[in-house]
Image: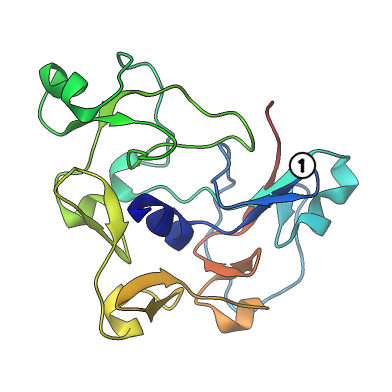
C-alpha cells in the first residue's frame, strides 16, 4: 500500500487495451519541461492514451520517472530470486526483494509484464528518491510527509492527507512541467506497447 502511494506520486495513470492501471511503463521518454504548453507532441509522445491511438492497439501512455539513484535506468532484474527482504541480506547493505507489491526504487513495469521478485539495491537516504519522496527504513522510496504543497519540493506535487502526491491536472498550465494522464509529471509521457 505504501509503495502504491509512492508510485502514484511518481507516475501518471496508464491505460492499455481499455483498462486502467497505476503501474509505470518500462520505457518512458525523457524530455525537459516546457511548462504551460499543450501542443507540439512528437511521434510517440503523449498526454493521454488518445495520443497513442495512431500507433495501433495495445499502447498505453505514461511517464517513467525514476528516482535520482536509478540514473534513468530501470532495475536490470538480474539479481538473485527472492521472496522476502531477508532473502537478500547476504547480497549486501540496502539490498531488498523488489517485486510488484513492494517494488524497489528502480523497479519498472512494462504495461503488463511483471518482473519476477529479485534482489535489488534499495535507497539509503532521502536524496536517493527525489522530490516528494523519502527513503523508508525498508530501503524503499515512499511518499514524503508534508504539511503543505511547498514541502513536496516541486510544483508537480500537492500535499494530501499529510503525504506528497502527484498533483491532479487537466492541462500543462496547472503543472511545473507536463500534465500526463491527469497528473503532473516532470517529463512528457511516452507511448509504450503493453508487454504480455
Q: Quadrant of residue 37?
A: bottom right
Q: Decide if residue 153 is in sight here.
A: no
Instruction: Please tell me how many numbered marks the rendered image carries.
Output: 1
Q: In this view, does 191 lie to the left or right of 24?
A: right
Task: Give the left or right position of residue 31, taking residue 91 as reference.
Answer: right
**How is the structure coloured here?**
rainbow
Q: Is residue 100 left or right of residue 19?
A: left
The structure residue drawn at horizontal position 75% and vertical position 54%, both measured from the top left corner, is 42
Image coords of residue 3 (percent x, y): 36, 51
Q: In this view, does 125 lie above or below 37?
A: above
Q: In this view, does 195 lie above or below 31?
A: above
Q: In which quarter of the image is the C terminus?
A: top right
Nearest to the observer: residue 38 or residue 8:
8
Horizontal and vertical percent for residue 144? 26, 66
Q: What element carries label 1?
A: strand
Confirm whether residue 55 shows in the render.
Answer: yes
Residue visible at 10% across and 29% down in the picture:
93
Residue to which mark 1 is pinned: 59
Q: Residue at x 41, y 70 (%)?
A: 165
Q: In this view, does 131 lie to the left or right of 74?
A: left
Residue 98 rendering spot, x and y as whole percentages: 34, 31
Q: Residues within 10 Å of mark 1 (few under 14, many from 20)?
A: many
* Residue 34 point in image, percent of width and height: 58, 71
Q: Which residue is drawn at 54% across and 46% down?
A: 24
Amino acid at each position: 500500500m505504501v509503495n502504491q502511494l509512492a508510485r502514484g506520486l511518481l507516475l501518471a495513470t496508464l491505460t492499455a487495451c481499455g483498462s486502467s492501471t497505476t503501474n509505470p511503463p518500462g520505457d518512458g521518454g525523457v524530455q525537459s519541461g516546457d511548462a504551460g504548453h499543450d501542443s507540439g507532441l512528437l511521434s510517440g509522445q503523449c498526454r493521454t492514451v488518445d495520443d497513442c491511438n495512431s500507433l495501433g492497439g495495445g499502447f498505453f501512455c505514461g511517464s517513467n520517472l525514476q528516482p535520482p539513484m536509478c540514473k534513468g535506468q530501470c532495475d536490470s532484474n538480474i539479481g538473485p530470486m527472492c521472496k522476502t527482504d531477508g532473502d537478500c541480506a547476504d547480497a549486501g547493505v540496502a539490498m531488498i526483494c523488489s517485486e510488484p507489491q513492494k517494488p524497489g526504487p528502480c523497479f519498472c513495469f512494462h504495461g503488463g509484464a511483471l518482473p519476477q521478485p529479485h534482489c535489488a539495491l534499495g535507497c539509503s537516504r532521502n536524496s536517493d528518491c527525489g522530490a516528494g519522496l523519502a527513503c523508508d527504513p525498508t530501503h524503499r522510496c515512499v511518499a514524503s510527509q508534508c504539511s503543505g504543497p511547498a514541502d513536496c519540493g516541486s510544483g508537480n506535487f500537492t500535499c494530501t492527507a499529510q503525504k506528497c502526491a502527484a498533483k491532479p491536472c487537466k492541462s500543462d498550465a496547472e503543472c511545473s512541467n507536463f500534465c500526463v494522464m491527469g497528473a503532473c509529471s516532470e517529463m512528457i509521457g511516452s507511448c509504450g506497447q503493453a508487454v504480455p
